[in-house]
Amino acid sequence: MNTFPTVLRILWAAALLATASPSAPGQGPAAPKPPRTPRMLPLTKFYDTPDPLPAGKPGELIRSQPFGEYYLPYDVLAVRILYHSRSSSGEDVAVSGVVLLPDGARPAGGWPVMAWAHDFTGSARQCAPSLLRNLNEGPLLSMYVGLGHAMVVSDYAGLGTNFPNAAMDMRSNALDVINSIPAARAALPQLGTKWVAVGYSQGGLAAIGVAEADSETGDLNYLGAIAISGVAEAQEIFERIAEGPARGLLVDLAHGIKTVFPEFRVEEMLTDKAIPLYQHISHDCEASSRTGLAANEMLKPGWKNNRYVKEFFVRNTPGWKPVHGPLLLISGETDPEVPADLTAPVVARLCEQKVRVLFVKYPGLNASAVLRNSVSEQISWIQARFAGLPAPSNCP
């Protein structure tokens, strides 16, 4: 591993501390705290679109809006965007997002662009990262802006806008990420043409989906993708989730399957006890995390054999489709849901395609720790892509 530069370590620590609630042992009673600012921002008319939505090409900007109420450093500018994308069935949908960029003179060629694919934040409309004051991963995004990048953060369709949300569907989320790039450039001409995709957890799969989709479109400005955790066979991921404390996410999984395959009958997967929770997740971002149901109380026997569940697993397993551009895959060996040994078969399939894959494993770390501790690896790989250097690979 590269040694993490001191200045970047300071930037990273400062960003994390800015969002924490400091406390010092041994001090007297704390002074009364002012009223807390709500963590979530209101869902405004900016996110609304006419019904039906006027037609637009994928990536066409609908509108943009400078926004100054995020928890961000003073020298980071934020602009919300609303743009056209496509659903899993090819229908025109509106997607929201936000663009972060340095407050300064644009460099020659414009700010290099990083498309951020976020992890799972919920299935309800108000769960969009652009409706969170910290943008879900604000310190990390701010750090990259401080290093001279523009960050384009898609909410994914149905988070923010009033369209069905294809929760946990890598293809749908990837298209929303890809289409955010031309929309961001239309809103902010100071953005450069070259870009990379970076995803974390669920967004890691979306980042691989970007690489798969780009093999179809052949965008020469796309330089590669980073997937941080979350990359494995879809069925294995959800089988492990069913056994752990995050098993409520299987209700969101049913929601995603229903969006991709409208013919899917949720009652064939979920029990009567789980149906009220399924109905509630469209109104509450944390509903599925609070379930008191065991897996066998939520899921029908043989639920994995349902035709649409199986098809959803197949379309969300990376490595079977052609991939364009180099990849950096980062995994933690103690990630409880997607450990590195589950990622290895995907890496093997990608290597068989002759893709330039750098697979980095961190022993003793879970997903959130890997996100923080791999920053130097991320930075060096990204800088090399924008510099036009050959991509490293540790494929056999």
Image (spheres, rainbow, N blue to C red):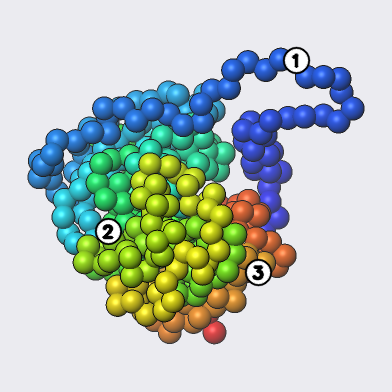
Callout 3 crowding tier (Cα within 10 Å): few <14, some 14–19, many ≥20: many
Residue 32 in the image, given as x and y percentages of width and height: 71, 15
Q: Residue at x 22, y 62 (%)?
A: 262
Q: Which residue is mark 2?
A: 259
Q: Residue at x 31, y 51 (%)?
A: 165
Dot 2 or dot 3: first in sequence order is 2
Whether residue 250 is situated above or below residue 186 in the rendered picture: below
- Mark 2 and mark 1: span between their CA atoms? 49 Å
- Residue 35 visible somewhere in the drawing: yes
Q: Residue at x 21, y 39 (%)?
A: 61
Callout 1 crowding tier (Cα within 10 Å): few <14, some 14–19, many ≥20: few
Whether residue 130 is situated above or below residue 68 in the rendered picture: below
Callout 2 crowding tier (Cα within 10 Å): few <14, some 14–19, many ≥20: many
**Res 169 → quadrant:** bottom left
Which amino acid, mark 3? Glu
Which amino acid, mark 1? Ala
- Mark 2 and mark 3: span between their CA atoms? 32 Å
Which amino acid, mark 2? Thr
Dot 3 or dot 1: first in sequence order is 1
Badge nearest the viewer, 3 or 1? 1
Q: Which residue is mark 1?
A: 31
- Which of 95 and 269 lies nearest the eye of the viewer? 269
Dot 2 or dot 1: first in sequence order is 1
Residue 333's tag is 3
Residue 350 in the image, given as x and y percentages of width and height: 43, 78
**Res 269 → quadrant:** bottom left
